Amino acid sequence: MSGLIYKLSKTKLWIIFCYFVLLFVVGAILTIVTLNFENSCLLGNAPITLIAIIGGIGSAILGNTIYYIRKLYKACIRNAVENPCGYNEKVSEIGIFFYFITRPFFAIAFSLLIHISLKSSVNFITVKEAIIDNGFIYLNMLLSFIGGFATGSMITFIEEKSKKVIKEKINLE
């Protein structure tokens, strides 16, 4: 969507900016609490898996909001945001609004997918949960941040790979 003219009313633009700033704060809080889990009364006795999930979600939200706040303010700076006129542009505005609103949900889903991938690789080499240490949390958080930041690229990657797998494994066109 870069280089495009976004058809968004000033009100919807402010809603999106406020939404992302609020989510950034939530992501930062989750990340900070997770990074300090040894001293946290909230996560002190929680299993590593739960701590990694919470930290991964926080990191994914941080990465995602940084990317999309930047995308929006750059569009504003280059005057690539216009008030919609007419029916078609108002319909386009709804799509653009939901594009931005739903991106953090995709980031959270990718964070969970990353967590599942890491856990399955750990389980594949038969390491028990009790042996997993803090490194698992930090790796999960790092990869989740990257996944959240690159949500659009992750969607494209999964779409392309899933088509290839379906075509090769199920022989569908």
Image: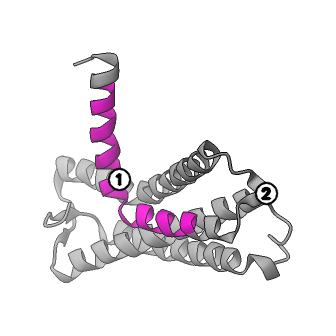
User: Magenta span: helix, strand or loop, mainly?
Assistant: helix
Q: Are marks 1 and 2 in contact (CB under 8 Å)?
A: no
Where is 111 relative to 38, above or below?
above
In this picture, residue 85 sits left or right of residue 42: left
Outermost residue toward the top in this view? 171
Q: How is the image coloured?
A: one colour
Residue 18, numbered circle: none
Residue in view at x 30 percent, y 73 percent = 72
Where is 50 relative to 124, above or below?
below
Residue 56 x, y percent position in the rendering: 58, 64
For the question of whether residue 80 can be seen, the reply is yes
Circle 1 residue? 154
Name the secondary structure under disc 2: helix
Residue 151 x, y percent position in the rendering: 37, 58
Residue 83 x, y percent position in the rendering: 22, 66
Circle 2 residue? 130
For label 2, count other residues whose C-alpha is less than 10 Å away and answer few (under 14), some (14-19) or many (20+): few
Looking at the picture, which amino acid does disc 2 mark? Ala
- The earlier-in-sequence mark between 1 and 2 is 2
Count of marks, rendered view: 2
Q: Which residues are magenta?
A: 139-166
Q: What is the quadrant of residue 124 in the picture?
A: top right
Looking at the picture, which amino acid does disc 1 mark? Met
Q: If the image is split into quadrants, where does the N terminus sit?
A: bottom left
For label 1, count other residues whose C-alpha is less than 10 Å away and answer few (under 14), some (14-19) or many (20+): some
In this picture, residue 117 sits left or right of residue 97: right
Of residues 14 and 24, which is closer to you in this image?
A: 24
In this picture, residue 69 sits left or right of residue 124: left
Is 111 magenta? The answer is: no
Is 151 magenta? The answer is: yes
Of residues 98 and 156, which is closer to you in this image?
A: 156
Q: Nearer the viewer, mark 1 or mark 2?
A: 2
